[in-house]
Image (spheres, coloured by chain):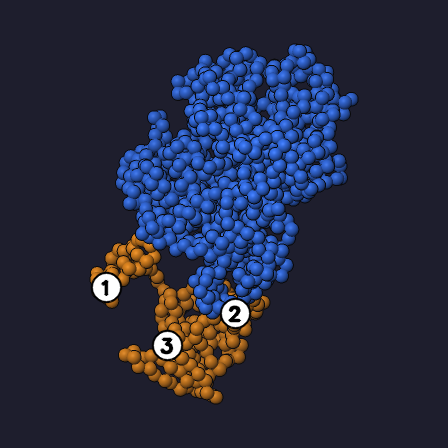
Amino acid sequence: MIIVTVGKPEAAATIRSALAMGADRAILVKTDTQFLDAALTAKALKAAMEKDGLPDMIFTGKGSVDTESFQTQYRLAHALGMPVVNEVSSLSADGNKAIAELEVGGGDKQVIEMNLPCVIGATKGLNEPRYPKFPDIMKAKKKKIEEMTLADLGLDASSPGVTLEKLEPVPERTGAKMIQGSVEEQVTELIRVLKEDEKVL
Amino acid sequence: MKTNARAVVIGGGAIGVSVAYHLAKYGWKDDVVLLEKHELTSGSTWMAAGNVSFFHGNYYGTQVNKKSIEIYKGLEKETGQPVGWHTTGSIRTADNPGRMDELGYAYSMNRCLGLDVSYITPDEIGKMHPFIQTEGLLGGLYWPDDGDVDPNSLTQAMAKGGRKLGVEFNLHTMVTGIYQKSSGEWVVETDKGDIICENVVNAAGLWAPEVARMVGLEIPSISIAHTHILYESIQEIADRDTYLPLMRDPDKSIYLRQEMDSLILGLYEANGQQWYKNGVPWDYAQEEINPDLDNISDCIEGGIERFPILGETGFKHVTAGPITYTPNAEPLVGPAAPLKNFYNACGYSFGITQAGGIGHYLAGWMMNGEPEIDLWPMDSRRYGSYANWAYNTEKIADTYPRLYSTIYPNEVRPAARPNRTSPIYEYQKQANAVFGDYYGWECPNYFPPKGEDEYEEPSWRRSNAFKHVGAECKHVMEKVGIIDLTRFAKTKIAGPGAKDWLNKMTCQRVPEKDGRIALSPMLDHSGNFKTDMTVSRVNENEFFCVTASVGKKHDQHWMIENLPKDGSVGMEDITYQVGCLVLVGPKSRDVLAKVAYDDVSNEAFKFGTSREIYVGRTKCRVNRMNYVGELGFEIFHPIQHQITLYHDLMNAGADVDIRLIGMHAMDSMRLEKGYLAWKSEMNVHHTPLETNVAWTVKMDKEFNGKKGLEKQKEKGIAQKLVCMVVDATDSDPFGYNPIFAGEERIGMTSSGGYGHRVEKSIALGYVKPEFAKAGTRLEVEILGR
Ligand SMILES: Cc1cc2nc3c(=O)[nH]c(=O)nc-3n(C[C@H](O)[C@H](O)[C@H](O)COP(=O)(O)OP(=O)(O)OC[C@H]3O[C@@H](n4cnc5c(N)ncnc54)[C@H](O)[C@@H]3O)c2cc1C
């Protein structure tokens, strides 16, 4: 398994965790900013993978947790001409095919069959992440992270299609309520608040 | 928020909340205010593992732990708030003989306190902890009553108890300044207004040095990032229905305890990372520190060797949190010298373990003026001005990785030294001194021949210094030597009220004639020893007082606190202006006579008198007395003359083989003579009436503590100091060894060692009076045997 990341040099720490969890090696495409536009990210991923040799399956998250643009996997699949399914919560392979399950709301489940190679956007439930063991963490240190820049891949970050102007917390609507007391008291009070004051339970 | 209070406690961590709760509980009720800049527990407390054990390196610390456990077990009943206490028991292992000796010392000391502790074999350890690999272990100690507590619930419980009693808790209230009014009242300034109060407690944890700086004090406390690892759930633990004991493998510098259905590994790595060592930012609260796995990997590997399952279990969460450390990792508690009514309760690195106990004891101390037990090992006055920030940052770099190292009673670490030196330091070095560290002073312990035993091997038994110390004692007994006691604390007390005031401060009668000396114990209000000083009368209105170096801050603070307000008594600290060389041995008078311009014959210069004489060109104050029990003279001199004086004495003594003598020899000889040592024999648990200085008590005058002594006289004493000769082969008693008559424990040693002049192992100790008869056979337990 190969980890491919486009990000700032600090992303290496996150890559190390993934290596400790079992990945074999990694590629880091270094950028100066944390937020790249999804089009460029997808281009960089494609270029890095093509350089390394295309895999049978590409896993991405269902969307980034910071910018939540939910586009990279689609753009990448499109560029590579591969099928793509997002929010996959269960997956199996059958010869040349991948069978993916995803929840579509209202308690319904979709089962999708795709040809390999394909792109899978993962969501919670697809896998129980393994906690890294100390010997694995030590081994991960010796695993290779190949580093390259956007320029090495013939890309240019100077005129992105989309730029992130600002990222700031939404102003709090109402002041958070601090519940005091012991753990038990706090829990009891929380349940009461949810039931009686907020009526959400 | 109140604007007036009896006590203001700064800091809402486990420590501050406990102090506030106990102050209220013991009577100050709603006159107690606690100020917390954020939420309760938001400093160190919220992250703590919550291990609570009886084990502590010293006797009184153990007693604080014991008190905590007692309090924690009762809190739920009192406040209705559970504290998450689990009795798990704990085991401390040993994989080498030095460690076994240390456990032996702990075992004996714990038995003095009546604690439930027992030796266990590697096999038994294996049975109690299924995950341990016992290979290489020699044994361990087991405390069945140890456990753990939830630090947050604990703090909340004490807060709840405090609130019920009327304590005002002001959260999100930051102390920004503190000053004392001329009336003596304190003004605590906060971002929500000022509070005027009688007493202030600095329990500001990570920020205690900043709060101390508000009142002009520098306290040695720096934070270090302490890491522990929570493992993923382990089926075998989930399947158990009893708690695993807390394990400490000090030789691997780790602890391991059960947390729900998993384990927490904590470690003290070789290279502790000091965190914001120049000062923790005010806005830090409740944040984890990024752990540095590389820095702790050796300890983790040690953990896996001892507990192989840790190598097969995933890390669920690795976390580091800041903990404060002082130079020796003991906290800083009690009156903050030289201030009045300002107290420290900070510098804690095991504050969850001690919060309950120290809240109880400090509250009592503040309310009664004296602590219920002798808290000297954690008294913030044990550090002088040498223990500044730079000293601390160097010293804890050595202390932190050694928190679990075997602490030997004779070990002197080289870290952060030298600090204070006598002017003759270079000459002591030339004479091959092996130095000890006393209140920041370099003071020779012994002088081996060149190339021999120049490092004293740390040991619980007789060390390689033994024969050299023996030679020095013999030398003092037969010839003459010089002991450097420049480090003595020296205080000048002068003024029209000096004599009367001193007479009130000591149970002894202050000398009535110029040039007389009196051994003068100072007592607390119940008659127990506060300190002991040698008072020489210079003239009717001036006295020269000498006390132990390590007690300087403590003793002088006691005097400052008691000085009359009318200015009739002046007090001057002359410690750093005046040196002291002690000339001792049968030839000492001859040597002195050779260099002195004055008559020093026995007739002209009697025992127990003090004179100002010229020793060579140096004008000195010489006391004819000393601490080793041979003919001798304590020669106090202007410190800038010391080298000259030293040469004069050495030249005068050359033909009688004069030499330098170290502290070890002095201590050996004082033991033989049964001379008392401060904080060993003379502490807050004993009065002079129990000792061989009962003669210093003059009941026909008024003095501090007289009522206490009257009561004691009436009731009769419960303990008596005895000097015991011990049959010992290679290890001598220290102090805190239990004394038995048959099966019955009848007392405890206060100090011990080897008397080289009498060639016997000796212990001083307090026993029940009926056993204090010459010729009684008793047993002293040394190192658990
Ligand atoms: C990872 C970890 C594990 C630990 N494990 C254990 C363990 O197993 N057993 C154990 O006994 N100990 C353990 N400890 C240590 C223990 O947490 C501390 O010794 C203890 O919490 C110290 O409590 P405290 O009240 O002195 O300090 P803190 O908890 O730091 O409290 C000080 C409080 O003072 C407040 N304050 C500071 N300045 C001001 C100001 N100017 N105005 C108003 N308020 C102010 C702060 O906001 C803070 O809340 C552990 C610590 C860590 C980090």
Say which chain tag 3 marks: A
Can residue A123 be seen in the rendering of this structure? yes
Report the disc number at residue A87. Answer: 3
Frontmost residue, B433 versus A191 = A191
Residue A76 sits in which quadrant?
bottom left
> The chain drawn blue is chain what?
B
Nearer the N terminus, badge 2 or badge 1?
Answer: 2
Q: Secondary structure at mark 3?
A: strand
Query: At label 1, which amino acid type do we have?
Result: Lys
Say which chain tag 2 marks: A
Q: Which residue is mark 2?
A: A19
Q: Are marks 3 and 2 on the same chain?
A: yes
Counting from the top left corner in percent of width and height, residue B623 is at: 61, 19
Q: Is residue B515 above or below residue B350?
A: above
Frontmost of labels 3 and 1 is 1
Q: Is the CB of the residue bearing disc 2 within 8 angstroms of ligand 1?
A: no
Q: Are marks 2 and 1 on the same chain?
A: yes
Side (left or right) of B586 relative to B437: right
Counting from the top left corner in percent of width and height, residue B703 is at: 45, 21
Nearer the N terminus, badge 3 or badge 1?
Answer: 3
